[in-house]
Amino acid sequence: MKHTLVIGSGISGLTAALLQAQRGHHVVLVEKQPFIGGFLNRFTRNGLRFDTGLHFTGGFGHVLSKMLEQLNMADAVRPAPIASDVLLADSGLRLNLPNAGLETARETLSRLFPAQADAIAAYYAAEQTVVAHTPIFNLDAFEPGDVFSMLTDYDALTVDELLDSLNIHTPELRTILPIFSLCHGSPPDTTPFPYHCRCAYNMEANLTAVSHGGDAFIGAFKRELARHGVQIRTNATLESLRFDEAAGICNCATLSNGEDFEVESIHFAVHPAAFMPLFPERILPPRLRRRVQKLRPTCSFFTIYGYLDDGAATESRLTFYMRRTELNGPLHPGQQNYSTGIVTSVDNGNTHPTVTAFRTMFTEDFEKFCGVPYESYRQAGAYLQAKQELAASLEADVLAAYPAYRGKFHLVDAGSPYTCRRFSPPIGSAYGTQQPLAVSRVVGRLPVQNCYALGHHAQFPGILGCMLGAFAQALPNNS
């Protein structure tokens, strides 16, 4: 019997596995970790559940809801309200983000920056143009060839170049307008404007948390995968592939546990560097290997987790805490600037409000800071000392953003970029690879006809991007 293999069980791999099974394929989902879900997983400290990666999303009431319906998961994955704001530490400016659509965002910022009202309107008009040229946001009408109609006049501009063209030079406005760059990890000075818009739009329209966080997603996926007979192999990797080069296909795959599978197709939901060595050089052309070498990781995070005394918070809220009023520094390695996202959650099935704060940090910068390589960090006292120092610094950010939490916030754990690397090898980046202007990603059908790369957020960043990429690839006749 031929099998469809999906390699990697983050939300991209889970979505791909379920879609392939719904279409009648015999699916095997392969995961290196002891459990499926990747950054969807939560953990328990002091009897409280904490999310590792899924803190908020956009798309409920829009494309996310449509995807959940098609996956038969809408009953289990439900939105929970969350407010949001931006706090610029060097100026003290704090702005509540409306998250009620582009028109409301335009009105809000125009009141705050009246001299730039026309430029703000032009910015959101450009974003609306990009959204109108993103047909996969309408899954019911999307056709595989429609991906090429996504190109617009803005594809040749970075986010910063668009801001320059509109004469938007106020540092505060240049930071607030594209603030959701922090949710895809690609800096405004190198990122195509449309790529940014496809992430920002759904969050600007309806930013929400997920009731019970990643537990809701993983529970729903497990239910549906079992219902469709998907086989799951954890603690396993793809060891080797065999090819019928005359036919241009992969015909056999061997896992690290010794199992062999006759292959119908393989879908890689992992970083290209993790699967490229499985293909002989004669099969994958040099130009494809050069594309992989050009890929650059997005930032990772240093994260602290804690809880609040009862009554210390009455609503869930996301705060973008900006140490300096600019967005590029936190999203480039080797910079002193950083940003901290602070998520207070009161609707997560816990007995106390929880707080998660995550600071942008690249894995290479963390290694320089702690002086310990990834391969030996678990036994190193310097690593633990670095964690304690950074955790104290992040706690200071939390209390600077929320003075009312002083004396009521209790730190329970911390995670470093090395922790992220364990979940998302080989780099540990939070959002896959960056999308700089004029650098194409590895996505879609590979030179081997029945092997596909899901793209590591190729066309659409974030959780929506992972799911949309799997949907686009699962459509009939899509290559």
Image: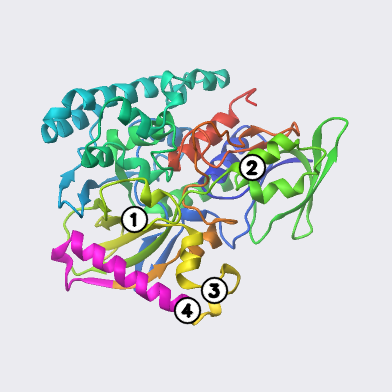
Q: Which mark is residue 337?
A: 1
Q: CA distance from mark 4 to mark 3?
A: 8 Å
The one nearer the camera, 228 or 163, is: 163
Q: What residue is disc 3 on?
A: 377
Q: Amino acid at mark 2?
A: Val
Q: CA distance from mark 3 to mark 2?
A: 27 Å
Q: Residue at x 27, y 68 (%)?
A: 395
Q: Residues within 10 Å of mark 2 (few under 14, many from 20)?
A: some
Q: Amino acid at mark 3?
A: Tyr
Mark with earlier residue (1, 2): 2
Q: Residue at x 33, y 50 (%)?
A: 211
Bounds of the magenta segment: 383-410
Q: Quadrant of residue 349?
A: bottom left
Left or right: 78 in relation to 446: left
- Helix, strand or loop at label 2? It is helix
**Where does the image place residue 402, in percent across and percent down from the top left?**
17, 61
Q: Which mark is residue 292?
A: 2
